[in-house]
Amino acid sequence: MFKKILIANRGEIAVRVIRACQETGIRTVAVYSDVDRPSLHVQMADEVVCIGEAPPLESYLDMGKILDAARTTGAEAIHPGYGFLAENHRFAARCEKEGIVFIGPDSKALKLVGDKVASRNTLSQIGVSIIPGMKSTGKEIATFQKEAEKIGYPVMIKASAGGGGKGMRIVRNPKELKQSIEAGMREAKSAFGDESVYLEKCIERPRHVEFQVLADHYGNVVHLFERECSIQRRHQKIVEETPSTALGAELRRTMGETAVDVIRATGYTNAGTVEFLLDEDKNFYFLEINARIQVEHPITELVTGVDLVKWQIRIASGEKLTIRQEELFQRGHAIECRIYAEDPANNFLPSLGKIHFLKNPEGPGVRVDSGIYSGYDVTRYYDPILAKLIVWGEDREASRKRMVRALRDYVVLGIKTTIPYLKDVMQEPDFVSGSTTTDFIEKNLGNWKESEREEFLEVALVAAAIQDVLQQEADSGVRKKIAFSPWTTLGNWRIGSR
């Protein structure tokens, strides 16, 4: 097992990896940009290294600086999290060359599956159903125009080097094509350091269903069942759940076996997902392999009892999978809501500034994966995800009701978040019934407005928080700045006598 791991990421996923390392007895190294110095992952790590200025290309996407940090601190392995360099085969190859373990697939497999076009071509040869699309990436607009006419509109522009909705666009007619391709290339370059994009046929109103997989270096592969990820805004997942309401036992078995076949065919190791689109007739099509830990991995952990991040580390260190497919089952139902620093009442514009007060929901079956705290500054440089709220219930309705309650208890003051929007998602009739397709948001919440009750509640919470802060200052007087400690988050407290 490793003694020290560098986490080449930030925010809630960096915090999640650090916690897994702490529980395993592994020392951690956090890297950070200059604006991220106060971040939670930096406060939690055993060692920290500044790797540059705020823009990702000057920090979190700079391979040289991250490898230098690993060498300087003596880190044996690098966990890339998701986004940034997590699916970059060149970075994995550089780690291999320098004798640093990349916690993920090797560079050869990562190059294949990370290149969405190459993986599509490979899997079509073994009989896996794929969505019609380009067999290579391109840069010439004329090439895309020709392919779009061949495939037939509407088409989907997708980044070849990464996922998460970055670089993705739906194009419904030839007039939109050039502008959409250029915008997709810019976004892909910013997110992944690679502007390559390609086209595939856009399937209307599908469900997005992915299967979590684990594969070791000894040929052992298991799937940990599905996650339904159909509720998306601008091709970005915002709500995920498991099990999917669309899958019966036989379809689940067939899709799971296909996911395992895909992983074996590509020589993939470590954790990842095989993603499918499921049409209205329950036909499923291979979409892509996401070669990393997923944002939504906690819901799988809650229904299977398997810690995916720890297994990533164990597999990368050379351990064999001790999990057998026949031993795995889903218990209960889990839902995840992604909490973004966005204003849903104002076209989801980023909401920047200081979080003056934070109160996470609590209670049985409630989990919060977060990278924020009271006093944290949200900047403009990175993806606006702040945290993930995850709940578990004995069945779907119990889980849904628990999520509604948890969202009502979630307080973030100082910036706008998507919390009130997500509360309405949870209570929308189509969600209650499980009728979730990728057009759910457009169909049900396209003209969403915050209710007057929510606005009144926010004002009341702000007033209460201000009163609380003023009272603390009056009681304690001037305070010196002290190092981060969980005790400092408790508010006023004292040791009493009996």
Image (cartoon, helix red, strand yellow):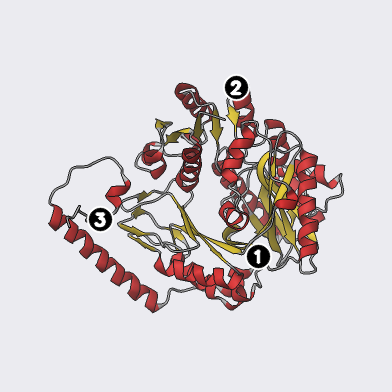
Tell me the residue that label 3 is attached to. Answer: 491
SS for dot 2: loop
Point out residue 130 in the picture as x, y percentages from the top left corner. 80, 53
The tag earlier along the polypeptide, 3 or 2, is 2
Cα separation, mark 3 vs mark 2, equals 46 Å
Residue at x-position 79% and y-position 62%: 251
Seen from the viewer's position, the closer of residues 29 and 291 is: 29
Which label is found at residue 99?
Answer: 2
Quadrant containing the C terminus is bottom left
230 lies above or below 74: below
SS for dot 1: loop
Number of other residues with Cα within 10 Å of mark 1, as a class: few under 14, some 14 to 19, many 20 or more: many
Quick check: marks 3 and 2 in contact, CB under 8 Å?
Answer: no
Point out residue 81 in the picture as x, y percentages from the top left corner. 55, 42
Q: Is residue 120 visible?
A: no
Residue at x-position 48% and y-position 27%: 65
Which label is found at residue 438?
Answer: 1
The tag earlier along the polypeptide, 2 or 1, is 2
